[in-house]
Image (cartoon, rainbow, N blue to C red):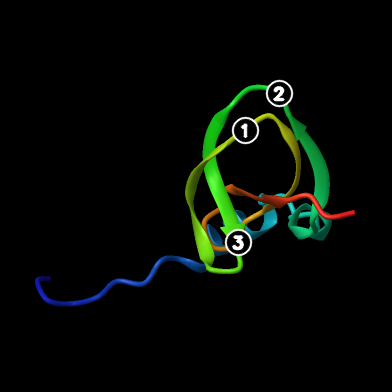
Amino acid sequence: MIGTIRERPHSVTRWFMENTTPIDPAVYEWRPCSILLPQIALKTTRFGTRLSLLWPGRYMVRQSRSMGRRIYRSYSA
């Protein structure tokens, strides 16, 4: 039939929910890290988050909830 919406069977949804690994909430916490080689990555500042060149040094890093990528910020002790 054209123009009708078919719903997914509940068994597919149930299978997907059962077979996904739970995400560890500690991944989203800031933790220290050292960078040895310059790299381009997402860096957050007081003005926002954008791609920038990270020079070797110490940074804080966490996983982004919305983008799924690592986000870096300057290290503050």
Q: Residue 41: x and y, percent?
A: 53, 41
Q: Where residue 36 is drawn, which disc sits there?
A: 2
Q: Residue at x 60, y 61 (%)?
A: 45
| Sequence-wise first label, 2 or 1 | 2
Residue that lies at the very extreme toward the right in this rendered image: 77
Looking at the picture, does residue 38 appear above or below residue 41? above
Under tag 1, what secondary structure? loop
**Viewer-proximal residue, 26 or 2?**
26
Q: Residue at x 62, y 33 (%)?
A: 55
Q: Residue 30: x and y, percent?
A: 79, 56
Looking at the picture, does residue 46 appear above or below residue 40? below
Q: CA distance from mark 1 to mark 3?
A: 15 Å
Q: Amino acid at mark 1?
A: Trp
Under tag 2, what secondary structure? loop
Q: Dot 1, crowdedness within 10 Å: few (<14), some or many (≥20)?
A: few
Q: Where residue 45 is drawn, which disc sits there?
A: 3
| Sequence-wise first label, 1 or 3 | 3
Q: Dot 3, crowdedness within 10 Å: few (<14), some or many (≥20)?
A: few
Q: Residue at x 9, y 71 (%)?
A: 2
| Sequence-wise first label, 2 or 3 | 2
Q: Residue at x 68, y 29 (%)?
A: 56
Q: Residue 4: x and y, percent?
A: 18, 77
Q: Amino acid at mark 3?
A: Thr
**Viewer-proximal residue, 57 or 3?**
57
Q: Nearer the viewer, mark 2 or mark 1?
A: 1
Q: Residue 47: x and y, percent?
A: 53, 68
Q: Work out which quarter of the rendered image holds the N terminus and state it.
A: bottom left
Residue, disc 1: 55
Q: Amino acid at mark 2?
A: Leu
